[in-house]
Amino acid sequence: MKIFLDTSALFKLYHQESETMTLQNSLGENDITSFYLSQITKIEFASTVWKKVRIKEINETEATQLIKCFESDYTKFSFINIDLIMVQKALVLLSKYGSLGLRTLDSLQLSTAVVLKDKADLFITFDSLLNSFFKSENLPNEFPDKLSLSDLEDLT
C-alpha cells in the first residue's frame, strides 16, 4: 500500500499525541510500501515543532531532536516536488475551495495529493477541513479495515 501523509498525520508519528497510537496501529496492520510527502512538509514539520516550543509543549532541545530525527528519516519517504503543475493545480483548487476555507499551504498539500491520485492508495490528514477536500476530490481516506479518518478524529 502506498500512502500520502500530510504534515498533521506525519507529525503524529514523531510526537506523541492522542491519535498517535491509533495511527501507528493502523499503519502497522497494513503492508506499507511507500510514504509520499509533499516537499513543503519539511517546512511545515519544522514550523509545527517550533509552535510546540512557543506553546511550551516541548523545549528547544526536544525540538531540535525531533527535527533531526525527521531529517534522518528523509530516505524513508518519497518527497514530491512543488513544481509549476502543482502551483497551477493549487490555484485551481483555491478557486474551487477557497470560499470554504482552503488556505495556501493546504492548497499545495491538496494539489500534491490530487496529482498522486493514481499512485497512492490512501490519503491521510488529521486536519478535518483538508480531509473534507480529500473526500470532495475522491481521494481514499479509509484504511482497508474500514477505520476512517473521522474515526481517528473521534478519539481525540
Image (cartoon, rainbow, N blue to C red):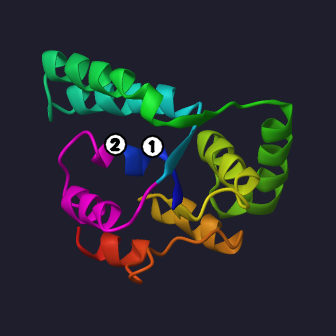
Q: Nearer the viewer, residue 96 or 33?
A: 33
Quarter of the figure with residue 47: top left
> Residue at the spot x=66%, y=53% of the render?
113
> Which residue is depicted at the point 62% across and 58% down?
120
User: How far across and how far down the image is residue 117, in percent?
Assistant: 71, 60
**Number of numbered discs visible in the structure rendering:** 2
* Magenta stretch in the rendered image: 11-32
Disc 2 marks which residue?
11
Q: Residue at x 29, y 46 (%)?
A: 13
| Circle 2 residues within 10 Å: few <14, some 14–19, many ≥20 | many
- Compared to 78, does 6 lie above or below? below
Q: Quadrant of residue 78?
A: top right
112 and 31: which is toward the camera? 31
Q: For mark 1, does the 10 Å Cα neighbourhood hold few (<14), some (14 to 19), or many (20 or more) residues?
A: many
Q: Quadrant of the C terminus?
A: bottom left
Horizontally, residue 143 falls left or right of residue 19, namely right
**Alpha carbon separation for disc pair 1 and 2:** 6 Å
User: Residue 7, which numbered label?
Assistant: 1
* Magenta-drawn stretch contains 144: no
Q: Is residue 31 covered in magenta?
A: yes
SS class of the residue under badge 2?
A: helix
Q: Residue at x 58, y 70 (%)?
A: 132
- In the rendered image, the vertical position of residue 138 relative to residue 15, given as above or below: below
Residue 149: x %, y % from top left = 41, 71
Whole-percent x, y for residue 3 in the image: 52, 56
Is 99 drawn above or below residue 14 in the view shown?
below
Pointer 1 with pointer 2, Cβ within 8 A? yes
Q: Amino acid at mark 1?
A: Thr
Q: Is residue 49 left or right of residue 5?
A: left
Q: Which amino acid lies under the numbered mark 2 shown in the image of this protein?
A: Phe
Q: Position of residue 22 (x, y in %)?
A: 24, 66
Relative placement, left or right, of 104 versus 7 is right
